[in-house]
Image (tube, coloured by chain):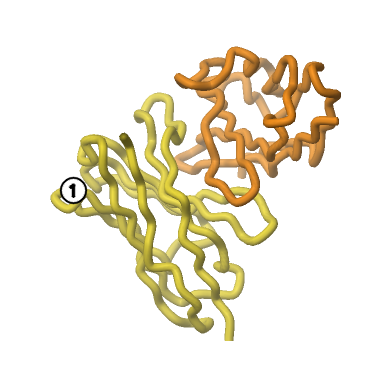
Amino acid sequence: SYELTQPLSVSVALGQTARITCGGKNIGSKNVHWYQQKPGQAPVLVIYRDSNRPSGIPERFSGSNSGNMATLTISRAQAGDEADYYCQVWDSSTVIFGGGTKLTVL
Amino acid sequence: EVQLVESGGVLVQPGGSLRLSCAASGFTFSIYSMNWVRQAPGKGLEWVSYISSSGSTIYYADSVKGRFTISRDNAKNSLYLQMNSLRDEDTAVYYCARTTNDYSKNFDYWGQGTLVTVSS
């Protein structure tokens, strides 16, 4: 079955750029979506179809996808960006989530 | 405003059954496919099941296949998850989530979740 690999944790200094990766075999051929989840809250879609932002999501959030890696980039990181982030794809009539990455803003 | 409100989560014994509901409002429910996604305490997201807008296409995660049944009532703007033969590992917050469209297949709206605890 298809697997998505994310780092358990990523740290970023306040105001700097954070990059969260999502690895999968030939993931560049799939649509990748990203969700942000804060403690006690439901997930929120922050990037869809690799690089598109839903309305209301700051331009600081961007995404890319090529080869075997998709990346969520958060520019000018703020304290409010501290959360768990999950990537997601569809594969063979199944939804796959990455294991999640905890972003810490220092 | 799009709203998804789950209900039905309780404490149930292993081997028991439970039916979750998700009440949708603020959008035309009948034209969107829907999903159930769960999250065990302290763990990541796990997709459970998908149902197309008409109910004609249904998918399940291997972990629940044969035990859970997804359904919908478009007249009542409601999504359901019938859960049978429950196991300890089914303990989780269960979210209903709307699929944006069947090309993109991302989840654009989520409910706040309902907690299912399976324990003796």
Tell me where residue B45 appears, x and y as whole percent: 59, 48
Given residues A14 and A47, the one toward you in this image is: A14
Apparent side of residue A42 relative to residue B28 in the rendered image (left or right): right
**What's the colour of chain A in the image?**
orange
Given residues A79 and A22, the one toward you in this image is: A79
Residue at (60, 51) in percent of width and height: A40
Tell me where residue A6 appears, x and y as whole percent: 74, 36
Residue at (26, 37) in percent of width and height: B26
SS for callout 1: loop
- Total labels: the figure holds 1
Apparent side of residue B58 relative to residue A32 in the rendered image (left or right): left
Q: Which chain is yellow?
A: B
Residue B117 occupies quadrant: bottom right
Q: Residue furthest left?
A: B75
Q: Is residue A100 visible?
A: yes
Residue at (55, 76) in percent of width and height: B118
- Residue type, mark 1 in image: Asn
Residue B99 occupies quadrant: top left
Residue A66 drawn above or below residue A88:
above
Given residues A86 and A57, the one toward you in this image is: A57
Apparent side of residue A17 relative to residue A59 in the rendered image (left or right): right
Tell me where residue A76 appears, x and y as whole percent: 74, 15
Residue B97 drawn above or below residue B63:
above
Residue B101 drawn above or below residue B18:
above
Q: Residue furthest top?
A: A59
Residue under circle 1? Answer: B74
Q: Quadrant of the N terminus of chain B?
A: top left
Given residues A53 and A39, the one toward you in this image is: A39
Residue at (61, 35) in percent of width and height: A36
